[in-house]
Amino acid sequence: MRKLAKYVWRFKNTQQGAALVLVALSVVALIGFAALAVDGGYLYFRHTRLQDISDSAAIAAGIEVVETGSKTKVDAFDAAIDYVKLHGLETANENNSSYTATIKWGTETGDITVSFPEETLNKIMVQINLEANTFYARVLGTTSTPVSVTSVVQIGRAKQQQGNLVPVGIYDSEYERGVRYELTYSPGDHIVPGNYGLLDFGDYEYVDEHGKKQKLQFEDFMKFGYPGTLAVGDIIKTQPGIKEGKAEDINDRNERCTDKKGYAHSPACTYESYQEPCSKIIVLPIVETVQTDPSGKHRRQDRWFCQVLL
């Protein structure tokens, strides 16, 4: 009897030990899941935010080169650093030779590098590395995790544009970068008599989801943009006569516009503050008058041809 009691007691103790092992393993697993959820979400947030900052810094560097006509890499580097600071990151040890700097975001540290892959100012790359803090993963011995993002901006003339093209031409002789223009439906002094700055893209035909042929015309392009492609060097026709009534269809874009909070047709939506994609944002081709129709077929209508510059 005593031997039986001894075996029962030993078995009981053995089962308690097994239970403790299972509990310990469960706690480790729970901490792991918590780390995956909390720390993973935090790292995703950090990566997304850093990508936005990196993109903005690269664009700022590109704008510095294009808008100011700067030809030095130091100016591009300084513009990128200035934009990083505007987004709340502290910088130090800025090196105008290697185009690097250290960054600090709260208690997190890292570095930023601005490079020029083509050894010119035609392409600018911004790389940001950050040691992001962890929370639950600290229990497992991981106090931080590296987060890295890269952005590249290419500087050069656009070779072609597809979609969202509005058939209103800006003539190169009148265009100046950075100047705000007011476009009207009336003819301008610089336009050839009989043409009013409106372009003729022709009809755009396509087959819809039901297999039926559909056709888009001038007024559709004013509302929704021309879905085709224009390339630099293309020769296009201008519209003869005034199409003021059809041109006013461009106002339909205002009704489809939403602001950053998602409110439709909000006056808060301006060219400085808008929600992508914004129906008010359009692409206008810059053109140059070339000649009248060489065939003479459209001379009575004063039909002129333009060459796309940009």
Image (cartoon, rainbow, N blue to C red):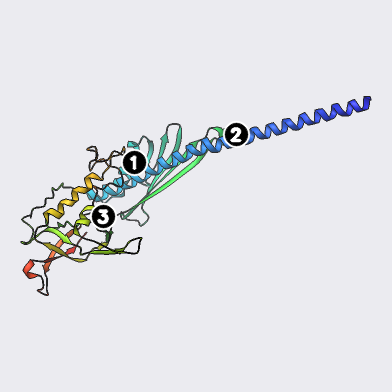
For the point 22% across and 56% down, the residue is 220
Of mark 3 and mark 2, the one earlier in the sequence is 2
Q: Which mark is residue 253?
A: none
Mark pair 2, 1: CA separation: 38 Å
Rendering coords of residue 74 (x, y %): 31, 46
List the residue tagged with mark 1. Answer: 81
Q: Is residue 241 left or right of residue 34?
A: left
Q: Compared to 103, does 98 lie above or below?
A: below
Q: Is residue 129 above or below residue 26?
A: below
Q: Is residue 251 left or right of residue 276?
A: left
Q: Which residue is mark 2?
A: 31
Q: Earlier in the sequence, mark 2 or mark 1?
A: 2
Verify CB contact (< 8 Å) between mark 2 and mark 1: no
* Cβ–Cβ under 8 Å for marks 1 and 3: no
Frontmost of labels 3 and 2 is 3
| Amino acid at the residue labelled 1 | Ile
Q: Position of residue 253 (x, y in %)?
A: 23, 48
How many neighbours does mark 1 have within 10 angstroms: few (below 14), some (14-19), or many (20 or more)? Answer: many
Q: What is the three-letter code of the residue carrying label 3?
A: Asn
Q: Secondary structure at mark 2?
A: helix
- Please give the residue where the numbered disc 3 appears in the rendered image: 164
Residue 143: where, in percent of width, then height? Answer: 54, 35
